[in-house]
Each structure stands twice: as structure tokens, then as C-alpha cells.
Image (tube, grey):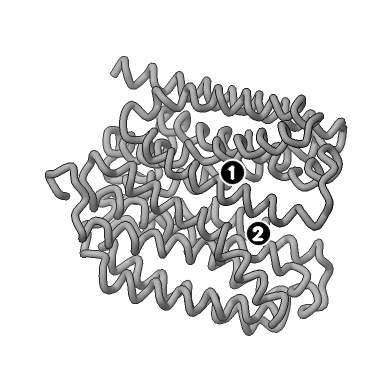
């Protein structure tokens, strides 16, 4: 690791390569939502059945990632990324030739596990590969790959799938994966293994109360947003009276605003991140709850939704680095496993938030989702305050 606090040209190449990797992984993960109709038609299944591909991906990601990270923790990181990425490319290619729902489900489950492990490896390689003072910048750029995937990769993949069939979308992700493979092979240096302890020792990390508290910070943070975001389209149409033709541009704008959220996330992580996050979650709670009132006005409602996007991923970089730092302090051999926990926590939060939002939505009125989202954000603030207090004591 460089002893300076400046990012060298090699550091930036490493960050760019890992950001490209997460852009590719994010495009493959999220694009499926845009081509469910095409999958439904091609495989002769219902839209609801096709939708299970999304939930199966999230569940497999959350369960499989920590297990595989603990099993592969002794392997050298660059070689592991290359091997897993090659398998990921082959699975995307296999998805393009899937003759049935069952085959596609199997390839997507395996792809989900590899996606989670590759994301985790990218985070720990970046964290160890740049100066300590610049880890926040590096990790925020890598998370930015996912943001760019939603803004650019998913619309392109959806367009291709709608006009050339879902198979063409997977051809696209296959080619993108091959490009990422070549970039990793050329740029990412050899790096020590992610862990040297036994599987039991590594999984022992999950029993540490400090790790558990830190894990649920992003779970509730993302959950707060998704209580509302899951029903953003109905809110736009019903509460704000926006025509269907304007929904896609507004969602695109939402994604663009989240890019700035990602940039700010790196700045928050640069100094006293957990101390700052306490207040970030309080502001997020106010922003979400305010939507209950601002939807009475179109300009105020849209501005509030933009603020919601701006707050949505401010937590990512700080919580990612914090989990790695806690592992280094309490269980160093499980550092790689710790790197997998933030992506897993975010998926848990998304599932929890959308389910909670569904309950609130079903029992109405719809804008109660804003109030509940605000309450969930306050839980994240409380957990962050507890973690920060424990850090100060130790």
C-alpha cells in the first residue's frame, strides 16, 4: 500500500478497473427487471413466474456470498477474481441459451453467488490497494459502478432485449464480462489472500455483536429508502398525477441524482464516517417523512424525491469500510468475509424494505410508506450512534 495520501496513476487504473467490474456485474443483476416480459414470452411462463428470477437472485446473493467468501478466503485475490469472472462469463452465455425457466433459474442462482463474491473481492482489493486516506474515494468509485449500471447499462440492456430478445441482453453482458476479465488480468496486481483462518474461525465473525450491529446499519438504511422507492411509480402517478410517458425520464433523473449521492458518500467516509452517518440518517428520516406532505404539490414532491435519491446511498462507502475495519480489529482472518457483508446487508435491506412497504401499501393510505420509511431510517441512526459510542469507548 502506498505510504502517501495521493492516488497514483496505477491507483486510478485499479479503481477504474474495479469500477468497470461492478458496472458489468450491476448491469447483469439489474437488467433482468427490464426484460421480464421478453423472458415470459420466450419461455412461455407468466410474468409473475419470471419475476421469481429477481427474488431468487437476491436470496442466493445474500446466502451464498458469505459462504463462498469464507471457503475461498485463503486464495490469492487476483487469481480468484479471474477464475470466478471467467465462470461468471460462461454462466451469462449459458443464460442466453437457456431453453426453459428451470435452466435460466439455475444459471441466475449461480450467477448471483459469483456476483456477490466478485463485488466483495473488488471492495477488499480496493481497500488494501490504495492509501488508507483515499479508501473512501476508491470504494465510492467502485460503488459508482452500480449507479452507472442503473443509469446506463440497464436501459441499454433493456432496449436490446426488447428489440432482439432476452438472449441478446445476455450476449451483451457476456461480452461486457470478457472486457472486464481482460482489464482485471492487465491491471489488478497480485494481492495477499483474503483470510488465513479456518472456515469456523472466519464464520465466527458473524457472532461478534459489533459486527452484527454494523451489519444492520446498511440493512435499515437501505430498507428505509425501499419502503418508499418500491412504490415510487404509483406515488408519481397517483399522488403527483404524472402521466405514464414521463415516468421513465423521472426514473432516469432519479438515477442521475444518485450519482451525486455516490460522490458525497466518498467524502463522508473520509473523516469520522460513523459520527457523520448518525446525522445523515436523521436527515434521511426527515426527507422520507416529508414526502407524506410534499406530494400535495408537484414541484415540491419532485424536489423531495430528488432529495430522497441524494440521500439513498450516502451510507455505502462508510459502512463498507467500517465492516472491514471492524474485522481487522476483532477477527483479521475474516477480512474478506467482512467485505461481503455490506452487499449482503443491502440486499437484506432491500428485501425487508420492499416487504414492509408492501404491507403498508396494502393497508393504505399509500403515503404512509413515507412515514414508515422515516421511522426505519431513525433505527439506522440509532444503531449508528451505538456503534459510534462503542468506538469511542474502545
Q: Is residue 128 left or right of residue 181?
A: left
Does residue 151 appear in this view? yes
Q: How many marks?
A: 2
Closer to us: 206 or 124: 124
Q: Is residue 22 left or right of residue 303?
A: left
Contact, mark 1 vs mark 2 (Cβ under 8 Å): no
Above-or-below relation of 283 to 221: above
Closer to us: 123 or 251: 251
Task: Tell me residue 29's x, y (percent).
Answer: 57, 62
Q: Secondary structure at mark 2?
A: helix
Does residue 223 appear in this view? no
Closer to us: 72 or 306: 306
Nearest to N terminus: mark 1 or mark 2? 2
Q: Measuring 83% from the left and 34% from the top, which residue is drawn there?
A: 366
Q: Residues within 10 Å of mark 2 (few under 14, many from 20)?
A: some
Q: Measuring 44% from the left and 51% from the top, which residue is drawn there?
A: 143
Q: Measuring 39% from the left and 22% from the top, which residue is drawn there?
A: 275
Which residue lies under the disc numbered 2? 56
Residue 368 lies in quadrant: top right
Task: Tell me residue 75's x, y (percent).
Answer: 28, 62
Which residue lies under the disc numbered 1? 348
Q: Measuring 78% from the left and 70% from the top, which residue is drawn there?
A: 37
Residue, far left: 3
Task: Tell me residue 374's x, y (percent).
Answer: 66, 26
Quadrant of the rendering where the C terminus is positioned: top left
Amino acid at each position: 500500500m502506498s505510504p502517501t495520501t495521493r492516488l497514483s496513476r496505477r491507483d486510478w487504473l485499479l479503481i477504474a478497473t474495479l469500477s468497470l467490474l461492478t458496472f458489468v456485474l450491476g448491469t447483469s443483476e439489474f437488467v433482468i427487471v427490464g426484460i421480464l416480459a421478453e423472458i415470459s414470452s420466450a419461455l412461455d411462463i407468466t410474468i409473475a413466474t419470471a419475476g421469481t428470477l429477481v427474488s431468487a437472485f437476491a436470496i442466493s446473493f445474500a446466502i451464498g456470498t458469505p459462504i463462498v467468501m469464507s471457503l475461498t478466503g485463503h486464495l490469492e485475490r487476483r487469481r480468484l477474481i479471474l477464475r470466478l469472472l471467467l465462470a461468471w462469463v460462461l454462466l451469462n452465455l449459458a443464460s442466453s441459451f437457456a431453453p426453459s425457466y428451470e435452466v435460466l433459474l439455475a444459471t441466475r442462482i449461480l450467477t448471483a453467488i459469483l456476483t456477490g463474491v466478485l463485488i466483495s473481492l473488488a471492495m477488499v482489493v480496493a481497500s488494501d490497494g490504495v492509501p488508507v486516506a483515499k479508501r473512501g474515494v476508491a470504494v465510492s468509485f467502485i460503488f459508482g459502478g452500480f449507479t452507472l449500471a442503473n443509469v446506463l447499462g440497464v436501459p441499454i440492456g433493456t432496449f436490446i432485449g426488447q428489440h432482439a430478445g432476452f438472449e441478446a441482453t445476455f450476449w451483451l453482458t457476456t461480452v461486457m464480462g470478457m472486457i472486464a476479465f481482460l482489464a482485471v488480468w492487465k491491471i489488478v496486481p497480485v494481492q495477499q489472500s483474503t483470510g488465513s483462518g479456518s472456515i469456523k474461525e472466519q464464520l465466527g465473525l458473524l457472532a461478534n455483536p459489533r459486527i452484527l450491529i454494523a451489519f444492520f446499519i446498511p440493512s435499515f438504511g437501505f430498507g428505509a429508502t425501499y419502503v418508499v422507492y418500491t412504490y415510487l411509480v404509483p406515488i408519481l402517478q397517483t399522488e403527483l398525477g404524472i402521466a405514464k410517458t414521463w415516468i421513465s425520464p423521472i426514473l432516469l433523473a432519479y438515477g442521475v441524482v444518485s450519482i451525486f449521492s455516490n460522490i458525497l458518500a466518498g467524502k463522508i467516509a473520509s473523516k469520522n464516517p460513523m459520527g457523520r452517518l448518525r446525522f445523515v440518517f436523521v436527515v434521511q428520516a426527515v426527507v422520507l417523512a416529508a414526502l407524506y406532505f410534499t406530494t400535495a404539490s408537484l414541484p415540491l414532491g419532485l424536489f423531495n424525491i430528488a432529495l430522497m435519491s441524494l440521500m439513498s446511498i450516502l451510507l455505502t462507502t462508510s459502512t463498507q469500510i467500517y465492516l472491514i475495519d471492524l474485522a481487522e480489529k476483532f477477527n483479521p482472518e475474516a477480512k474478506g468475509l467482512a467485505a461481503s457483508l455490506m452487499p449482503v446487508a443491502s440486499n437484506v435491506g432491500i428485501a425487508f424494505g420492499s416487504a414492509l412497504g408492501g404491507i403498508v401499501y396494502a393497508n393504505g393510505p399509500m403515503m404512509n410508506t413515507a412515514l414508515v420509511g422515516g421511522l426505519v431510517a431513525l433505527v439506522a441512526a440509532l444503531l449508528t450512534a451505538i456503534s459510534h459510542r462503542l468506538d469511542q469507548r474502545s
